[in-house]
Structures are given as structure tokens and as C-alpha cells.
Image: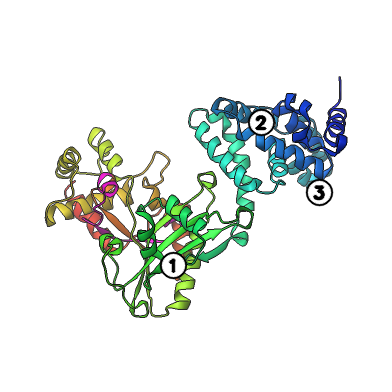
Amino acid sequence: MISATNLFNDLVSKITEAGRSITGVTTISSINLETLCEYLLTGKGEATGIAIAREILGRYKHLDNEGKHAFFKTICDEFGSDQQKLEQAFSEWKAKGITAARQIHFASEPKSIELIRRLNRVKGATSQLVEMRAELLGFIKNDPELKPLDDDFKHLFSSWFNRGFLELRSISWSTSAEILERIIKYEAVHEIQGWDDLRRRVIEKDRRLYAYFHPAMNDEPLIFVEVALVDGIPPSIQPILAARREAIDPKSADTAAFYSISNCQPGLRGISFGNFMIKKAVMELQREFPAIKNFVTLSPIPGLHNWAEQEINTPSGLLGETQLDYLKKIITDNIQPGNKDEANLLREITAIYLVKARTPSGSIVDPVARFHLGNGACLKHIHANANSNQQGIWNAWGMMVNYDYKLQDIERNHEAFANNNEVIHSSDVQALIKKGHKNV
């Protein structure tokens, strides 16, 4: 049986023959991806390793969905921990005690982690690996056995994309067209209706747009936030997005409203840097506009409609008969509340949903609420008839929420949510909950 080292040396000779790269050697095309991955892990030479890694990434890119799924399956199943090394590390730990414990950590690391590291040596590979993980996440929906491989990606990305490497940039009309095009493409909350709409969002004196970038991903934004400088906490998105409006002097504004936060890279899901961005943006705004005292969001409630349907079909006991009857009406007609009483009723339902509704694991249901509360915000106000666009009406009948960011409270709020699933909320929201429970 030929050893991995001999196989690797044979491959090196083929690669280096006549000074040709791996892609220039016709016989290499017959070597399957699994074997190339083994070669990549076995080799010591950096130049040869980069050539092999480039070949692997190129081959992967041209696989169809079935081929990519098979590739992930192979890496997950065949590139795990070295059992022999792990057993040896345990034996040394038992013999030597705590001084040998670190060796268990190194021995237990699956080969797939080192494989991803070596693939990342190729110039531009970080973006490709982020895209690769996005595709992996798609396969996991139907094949949860791939989850350990995703854990490997997430472990590495958490280090590669920590806030020490991230750069916050202010996006303006003078920013490169390439980046501006990506901002239009990635906007996930309030669709940007072409260049004129984008221009209004970045050029008006009472508007700001900040984005995080990573040096290994060139001009690919990771996440961005759009900010409106306004007088008073905004109860509706329509005036902010209006094509015809009068810009105010930002020095007279008392509130910075974060009205849209968009994650740009699906492959970085679960890598948390949104909270760092908000804190950094708050500090930037405070430095530029000392008169601003309020830093709030104007956020959608994407999970409200689905939860309401579940409550109708399988009541949890959180809502009373009056509330359930009203939900049946607006679900059937898919309309916004028609008068003040209906608006207040829906505000009560929304408050109960955001604070009291829980998953089987005890977490709150709404994903946007989880994001902001996990970042240390306080649930401040709930507004009816606040969003008239089609998605806003479908998801939450036009309801929107202000989450309040106070720098002095962020850490305490975050700890309460992270440790106890406690939703820090205002007296206004508490009043809505109490009034709603009187109807239960």
C-alpha cells in the first residue's frame, strides 16, 4: 500500500514537472477531490499547497448541487479527529496530569478544520469559503448530519471575523460604484428602488450609512446600517423613506434612528458583529453630533403573522377570545388596523408576542427581537400603521418597533437576556401587556 507521503511526493513531481502549475497537468484531472484534500493536509511545501488548494476550490465551484452535497458529506465523515492521536493524548494526560491537557485539544481537532485553514491560503479564498458555508447551510436543512462540519466553519469564522479585524466605513455618494451596487443588492429590510433612492439615503445631510468590511474580502460589505437623523423617536417608516421630504439640519436632530440593518453574507450567519457595529455607529454619531440623545431602531416584526396563525390553530393561552377573534379577522382580510381601538388591540397582541411568546427552548420567537435584545437594547415602543409596504403588511399588519440603545445599559440588558431570556422593556410596553392580559 502506498503511503500518503509517497502519494504526495508523486503529486509534487507531477505538479513541478516543466514548471507547470497543477491546473496545467492533464493527469491531475483524474485525481478526485477527496484525494486532493488528503494531499493538501499531508504536504509541507507552501507553494505546492496553494496550488492544490486552488485546484480544490476551482473544482468545488463547478460541482452541481449533488456533487457539492457529496463533497460536504465526505469531508464531514472522513476528515474527523485522528483517533490514534487522541487516545495517545488521553494516555499522556492520565500519566502527566494537567500539564498534558492542552495536547488533548490539539489531538481532538478534526482534520476538516486544518483543511479549511489551508484552503484559505489561496488569495481571495475567504470569500469563497464564506460562499461555501452558505451552500452548506442550505444542505443542512435536509441533512442535519452535516452540522459538525458547519461547526468547524463557524469556529474558524468566529476568529477570522472578530471585531479586531473589521473596519467600519461611512458610505457616501463618492463611495465606489461597485460597493454602492452591492448595498442596493444586499438591502434586506426596505428595498432600495434604484440609484435615485440610494442617493437619497446616502447624500442627504440628515442621513448616514455605515458598513463593516473585512480586509480579506476586499469591497464586500459584511453588514450595514442605515441611519436617519430626526426630531423625536419616529413612529413610522413612511416619512423616513419618502422620496419628497425636506431634510433637516442634522445639528438640530435629537434622535438617530437605525431604520435598516442588513446582513450581507449568508455564509456568516451566526457570526455576531451586529452589536459591535451599532455601538461603533453610536460612538461615531455622538462624536459628530453631540446634541443627539436618543439612539433607537425602527424595526420590523417578521415573525408576528406566523405566530398569530399558530395561536389561532393551537392557542397557547397568552391571548384572549377577543384578541383571537380580531386576529382571525385581519388574517382573513390581511389588512392593517382600521381605527384607534383596533390599533391598540394589535399593539397589545404584539407586546405579548414580543415579551411573552417563547419557543420550546424558552427563547423569544421573533428573530429581529432576538438580534436587538441580544445586543443589549430595550424594547421601547410599539407602533401600529407604521409600515405600509407589502412585506410590512404581510409580516405584521404594518406594525413596527423601537428598540432603544443606551450605551450605559447595553451590557446589563445583554446579560439579562443572554443569561435569563429576560426581555428588558419600557413601562409603555408593560402597560400594553397588562391591558392585554385583562382580556385573557
Total labels: the figure holds 3
Disc 1 to disc 2, C-alpha distance: 44 Å
Label 1 vs 3, first from the N-terminus: 3
> Reading the chain from its start, which is encountered first: label 2 or label 3?
2
The answer to whether residue 109 shows anywhere in this view is no
* Residue 310: % across, % down: 28, 36
Q: Is residue 393 magenta?
A: yes
Mark 1 vs 2, N-terminal side:
2
Label 3 sits on residue: 99
Cα distance between the residues tagged 1 and 3: 41 Å
The residue positioned 44% from the left and 67% from the top of the image is 409
Mark 2 or mark 3: which is in front?
2
- Residue at 87% over, 33% down: 13
User: Quadrant of the rendered structure where residue 359 is?
Assistant: top left
Direction top: furthest residue: 1
> Residue beneath label 1, please?
409
- What's the image's color scheme? rainbow
Around disc 3, counting alpha carbons within 10 Å, would you say few (fewer than 14), some (14 to 19), or many (20 or more)?
few
- Say what secondary structure mark 1 lies in: helix
Q: Which residues are magenta?
A: 372-394
Left-right relation of 91 to 198? right
Task: Check if mark 2's residue and mark 3's residue have beta carbons within 8 Å.
Answer: no
Label 2, label 3: how many angstroms apart (C-alpha)?
A: 32 Å
Res 251 quadrant in image: bottom left
Element carrying mark 2: helix
Secondary element under disc 3, as helix, strand or loop, is: helix
Q: Is residue 125 magenta?
A: no
Q: At which x and y percent is residue 325?
A: 15, 40
Mark 1 vs 3: CB contact within 8 A: no
Residue 53 x/y as whole percent: 72, 39
